Amino acid sequence: TQLLEQSPQFLSIQEGENLTVYCNSSSVFSSLQWYRQEPGEGPVLLVTVVTGGEVKKLKRLTFQFGDARKDSSLHITAAQPGDTGLYLCADNTNAGKSTFGDGTTLTVKP
Amino acid sequence: NAGVTQTPKFQVLKTGQSMTLQCAQDMNHNSMYWYRQDPGMGLRLIYYSASEGTTDKGEVPNGYNVSRLNKREFSLRLESAAPSQTSVYFCASSEAFGGNYGYTFGSGTRLTVV
C-alpha cells in the first residue's frame, strides 16, 4: 500500500500570506488528487493530476505534480479565511482503493 | 443537488449495540465506498462496492458489514459496537470504480461508542 506523507501537519497564517503544502511518497503515483475538508463536512475534490510535471490552477490555488510523479504540492496565493480547512492528498495507484494522507490543517486568521 | 446523503449525522451507542449507517447518492454513480476518519490517521477504507451487486473489503473491514441495496444505496452495519469504532464515518461515491474519477463524499456520521 502506498504511504503518503503530508507536510506540514499544521499551518497557521495571517490573511494575505502565501503558503505551500506538500504530499510525498516513496513510490510513483498513478494519479493524485487534492481534497479540502471543512470542519463538520466531508472532503471536496479540488483537482486531479495525472502527468509528471503537470501544473493546474484553480483561482488562487496552484497544484504541481512532480516530474517523477512521487510528490505534489499545493500553493495558495493571498490566503483568505475561507481557505481554512484540512487539505488531503489521495493516491489512486491501488486499483480503486485510494490511499489518503493524514492531511495538513490550515488556519487562516483574519 | 443533494449528492451523497448520510443518516444519521450523530449517534451514541453502548458497547455491544448494533446499528446501520445509511447512505444514498443521486448522481447515478456506479461505485460507492465507506471510510472512517480518525484523528491523525486520515481516511481509511472499510468496504467498497465497485458496482451494483458487488461488495469487497477495504483496509479495515473487521467488525463491519455492508449491503449494496440498489444502485443508489449502500449501508454499513455495526453488529456489536466497540469503543474502537468511535469515529467519523464517510460514505462516498464515484462515477466508476477507481479514484481517477474523484470521489463525492457525504457530510459524515459522528459515532461515539461508550
Image: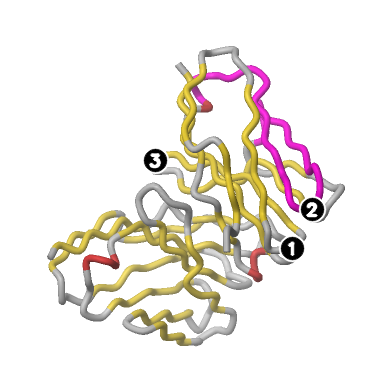
- The reply to whether callout 2 and callout 1 are in contact (CB within 8 Å) is yes
Q: How many marks?
A: 3
Classify the position of the C terminus of chain B by image quarter.
top left
State which region is magenta: B61-84
Q: Amino acid at mark 3?
A: Pro
Q: Is residue B92 left or right of residue A105?
A: right
Mark 3 lies on residue? B39
| Residue B111 image label | none
Using the image, name the chain to which the residue with label 2 belongs: B
Q: Quadrant of residue A64?
A: bottom left
Instruction: Estimate the spatial distance between the alpha carbons at disc 2 and disc 1, rounded to whole Å.
Output: 7 Å
Inspect the magenta stretch and tell me whether residue A4 lies in it: no
- Identify the residue at horizontal 37%, vertical 74% (top origin): A74
**B92 shown above or below B112:** below
| Residue B71 image label | 2
Q: Earlier in the sequence, mark 3 or mark 1?
A: 1
| Residue B28 image label | 1
Instruction: Estimate the spatial distance between the alpha carbons at disc 2 and disc 3, rounded to whole Å.
Output: 31 Å
Q: Secondary structure at mark 3?
A: loop
A69 vs A74, nearest the viewer: A74
Front label number (3 vs 1) = 1
Q: Is residue A87 left or right of residue B109?
A: left
Q: Residue furthest front?
A: B1
Q: Are marks 3 and 1 on the same chain?
A: yes
Q: Earlier in the sequence, mark 2 or mark 3?
A: 3
* Neighbourhood count class around disc 2 (C-alpha, 10 Å): few under 14, some 14–19, many 20 upward: some
User: Residue B69 location, x and y as percent?
Assistant: 80, 42
